[in-house]
Amino acid sequence: MSTPERTETTTWGPRALALAALCGPLWPTTFVLQQASIGRLLLVIVALGVAVDLVAVRGRIARPAWAVAALMAALGALAGWTVLNAMLFGSLSGGVGQGFAELVVLTGLTGLVGLYAPHRWLLVIFGAAIAGVLAGGLLALAGIRDLHAAIYEPSESAGRLEGVYGNPNFLAYALSLALPATAAAVVRVPGWRRWATVAVAAVLGGLLFATYSRGSLLAAAAAVVVAVAVALPRRPPRSVVIAVGVGVPLLAGAFLVSPFYKSKRLEADFGATQVQNAGGIDRSGWSTLAVGPVRSAGAQLSNPPRSTDLVVTTLRAGQGAAYTLGRAFGDGRSTWGFSVVAVGSATAVPVGWAVLDDRGATADSGLVRAGSRTRRVTARFTSSVERRYLTFVWTEKPGAFRMSRVQTSASPVTTKLLGSVADTLAEHERNYEGSRRAALRMALNAFAAHPVQGLGLQQFPGYAAEHGRFGELATHNTYAQVLSELGLIGALLFLVATAILVLCLWRGRPPPLLRAMLVGTVVAGTANLVFVNGLAAPGTAMPLILAIGFAAACAGEPPSWWPRRLLRMPRRRDKAGV
């Protein structure tokens, strides 16, 4: 049964916490010890609001405080060990320790607010956090990303959304934490508010997809299923729950490994034109795409054994190759030339050639009949320093020819092929996935080598650079980060805090909508932490912080085996209940 609501309470703390939740995107994702950040100002405001409320109720609260006290004892011990570990074995300079300390403080304040605020206020605060995440996503969509300088690991992707969070994976982390609560609200709220919530959920889902963060997409898929299942007024049959709970994540996983999604993700990273034409562009600069005088794509480029000459093989007339010379070195007369000979043909192969500027105007062109004897071609044209120049060669009928001694008046032009851009993109994807697996393996090795105290806070990147081939790496996994950097001490404290949270969710009986929001958000956070180091940026993890604090506040009476005199706070009784 849920705890009856009190009719009167002061609301300075809930109002301040709602403001902090709404301003989540403005919270820095890196920390400097002396930095007077917006997040730290918000922490002070929330603390003052909670203090005013507790004074007003004379310290007497409406709900049992055992879970909040126990959870904060575990998280406080973990934060203390994190700072001590950094001072003894690691470093505090990167801000991870400060960020986690702020997260713990905010979680504690959230738990205190949850102990005395009516349930409707807890829903309002959750709604403010969702609105903040939505605003952060819309700012990213608008291209706004520099509201403050303290962003974590800024990315250089061509089209993945990142916004003020500075990294697509962090924006995706925040979006995936907001989606389950929004999905639960779709099930529970009536009337026009349901349609408004559907619109919010659709926008959050679209923004999440635009980040192309696979881990967060999987986490959101699983968490939405859980949140909706908990929010349903009537429990569906167990077979339906199992089928949906297993089927939806599997479908999401299948989609994420599909060629369509992989192609779209690469386009977001490198640009659509680069990816769509990757198979026809060599890293040396030679291209077989249909452009300019090359009327048909599909020519094959190769280097003969032990030679850097370029062999162009065409299967139809109009196929050939192009090379961009770039901007002219100066105004005046310029040349471009090459030697050509037919390959594998007893008859001459007609080879067209041309030099065009970047406006498409022809600077020089011609036709040479490539036969068994080498012929030299030289293009002469007037160049302008304001223009860029492209060269083309193609066949007027199917055949093959060999080019050598390709050069301009300024320098030689390479004909050694380096592999297609498509191969480069595939290698990039393999390296990306391989680096994640390598980071996890090295984190376990680091824990095995330093099992008690770990490597020390923020020491894993250096360890990875020394023991791996990818340079400095983050663990990209919070659980692996705790094991490798904080050792068994940190891992045990983390497990204790997690066990308390699970107990709170199991025993708590808040209103159905709030319960679904709490459970779904915690599931999303638990899954996300497999893919991201997500406990050092309170603004990014805002919905998860609220879910943890409110779950502890709504845990109900302590279990029968809990020490009755331990960690209890005075409770206020009034006419409306307990």
Image: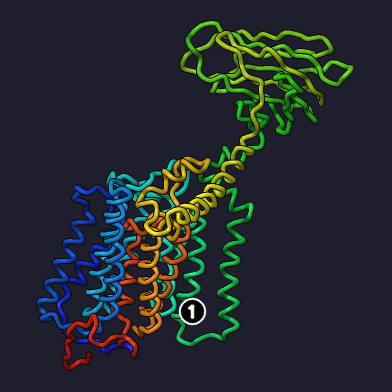
What's the residue at 70%, 29% (across, down)?
A: 295
**One can see residue 243 in this view:** yes
Residue 172 versus residue 120 in the image, above or below: above
What's the residue at 74%, 30% (across, down)?
A: 300
Count of marks overlaid on the render: 1
Q: Residue furthest bottom?
A: 575
What's the residue at 17%, 93% (across, down)?
A: 575
Horizontal and vertical percent for residue 218? 52, 63
Around disc 1, counting alpha carbons within 10 Å, would you say few (fewer than 14), some (14 to 19), or many (20 or more)? Answer: many
Secondary structure of the residue carrying tag 1 is helix
Horizontal and vertical percent for residue 222? 51, 69
**One can see residue 193 in this view:** no
Which residue is disc 1 drawn over?
229
Horizontal and vertical percent for residue 229? 49, 79
Q: Amino acid at mark 1?
A: Ala
Horizontal and vertical percent for residue 328? 51, 14
Q: Quadrant of residue 61?
A: bottom left
Q: Nearer the viewer, residue 474 or 425?
A: 474
In the displayed structure image, the side of residue 424 where residue 540 appears, left or right: left
In the rendered image, which quarter contains the N terminus?
A: bottom left
Residue 113 versus residue 101 in the image, above or below: below
Q: Residue furthest top?
A: 333
Residue 425 versus residue 390 in the image, above or below: below
Q: Nearer the viewer, residue 230 or 351?
A: 230
Residue 469 versus residue 569 in the image, above or below: above
Q: Quadrant of residue 421?
A: top right
In the rendered image, which quarter contains the C terminus?
A: bottom left
